Amino acid sequence: MKKLLICAALFLAFFSSCKKESKISDNTAPDYYGVSTIKVKNYINRIFIDLTGREPLDTEMDSLVLVLEANNLKFSTREAIIFNLQNDTTTQSNGDNFKELFYANLYEQQKARFLEGIPDFEIAQRMGNAYTAARNDSLTGNMLGYFWNKEQGDIYADVLTSDTAFLNGSISFNEMCRRMCYNGIYDIINMNSFNYVNAVFDNLFYRFPTTDEFNASYNMVEFDQADLLFGKPGSNKYDFSRIAVNSKEFNDGLVTWVYRSYLSRFPTTQETFIYSNHYSTNSNISYIIKEVMKTDEYANF
């Protein structure tokens, strides 16, 4: 019990140091009297799995139940717990690093979203095959084959390293998604340019393209022909993927992905507007996830 109280004190000290961000305010504090401990445990278990990909340890569960119940399940307390699981770099008793787990889990979620959850070893195998083919081409003097195969290997390498690159801040979440829909595996899943264009719109924006959007996208992907998409010029498949993930449509689709992933529903027009604009300004997907996870709807309180 003494150990749990110490853990609780540490969590409370962490909470008091967290900087609050602007959000949809809650004018009146709800009374959570009667919410059972089992519901609180279910909430903690759910945020651990959704954020880190694992269940909490017994000591983590007990200390967080103590903190939440002692603070009447306040939104600020929930925010601090979620923020901690997204950002804490302290090595845990089992060797875990919460921040690394959070980014690795986001990476796995995007692979499930775009690449049917293909394991890393298969991506690495394709990367190795491409680099081997490039080396063989260089030995035989086939420089066109060398450059093409090397490019394919680099593309697979970009997919594999997108989790650590996003964690280290060298790429954005937008770029991670671009890499997920710009590789040979995604091409195989969505064979031919017609299916590819529709799949990118569906995966990123949760809708299919208009006739004008499809024609412009198809011209870039199929014919390497210059055209305009969302007011931006492009002339090849890479340009198409880059324009798609740097559009306002992407921000709206990101909010939709968060709500469908964590609440199993589409966001309202107001929710999309608020969080899409927030992401456009801050490029912070962690904040949107935190705002969703702190709600009573997600917690089932």
Image (cartoon, grey):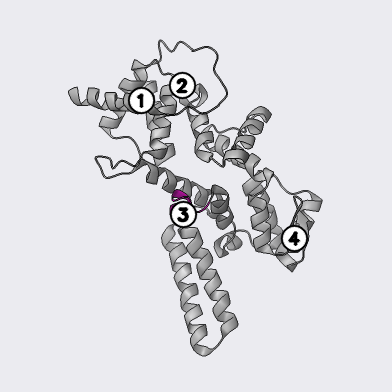
Q: Which mark is residue 218?
A: 4
Q: Is residue 112 left or right of residue 46?
A: right
Looking at this view, name the residue that lies furthest to the bottom.
140
Q: Nearer the viewer, mark 4 or mark 2?
A: 2
**In the depicted structure, whether residue 158 falls above or below residue 10:** below
Please give the name of the residue rendered at 72% of the width and 66% of the height, measured from the top-left corner: 222
Q: CA distance from mark 3 to mark 4?
A: 30 Å
Q: Is residue 40 left or right of residue 93?
A: right
**Residue 298 rendering spot, x and y as whole percentages:** 49, 27
Q: Which mark is residue 183?
A: none
What secondary structure is marked by label 3? helix
**Residue 191 rendering spot, x and y as whole percentages:** 64, 62
Q: Which numbered disc, 4 or 1, marks the residue that appears first in the sequence?
A: 1
Do the residues bearing badges 4 and 2 touch, measured as CB atoms within 8 Å? no
What secondary structure is marked by label 1? helix
Q: CA distance from mark 4 to mark 1?
A: 50 Å
Q: Which numbered disc, 3 or 4, marks the residue that appears first in the sequence?
A: 3
Amino acid type of the residue that numbered disc 4 sits on in the rendered structure? Tyr
Q: Which numbered disc, 3 or 1, marks the residue that appears first in the sequence?
A: 1
Decide: few, some or many residues near mark 4? Use Cα within 10 Å; few <14, some 14-19, many ≥20.
Answer: many
Amino acid type of the residue that numbered disc 3 sits on in the rendered structure? Ala
**Span highlighted in magenta in the image:** 162-171
Q: Which mark is residue 41?
A: 1
Do the residues bearing badges 3 and 2 touch, measured as CB atoms within 8 Å? no
Q: Is residue 12 left or right of residue 244?
A: left
Q: Which residue is mark 2?
A: 75
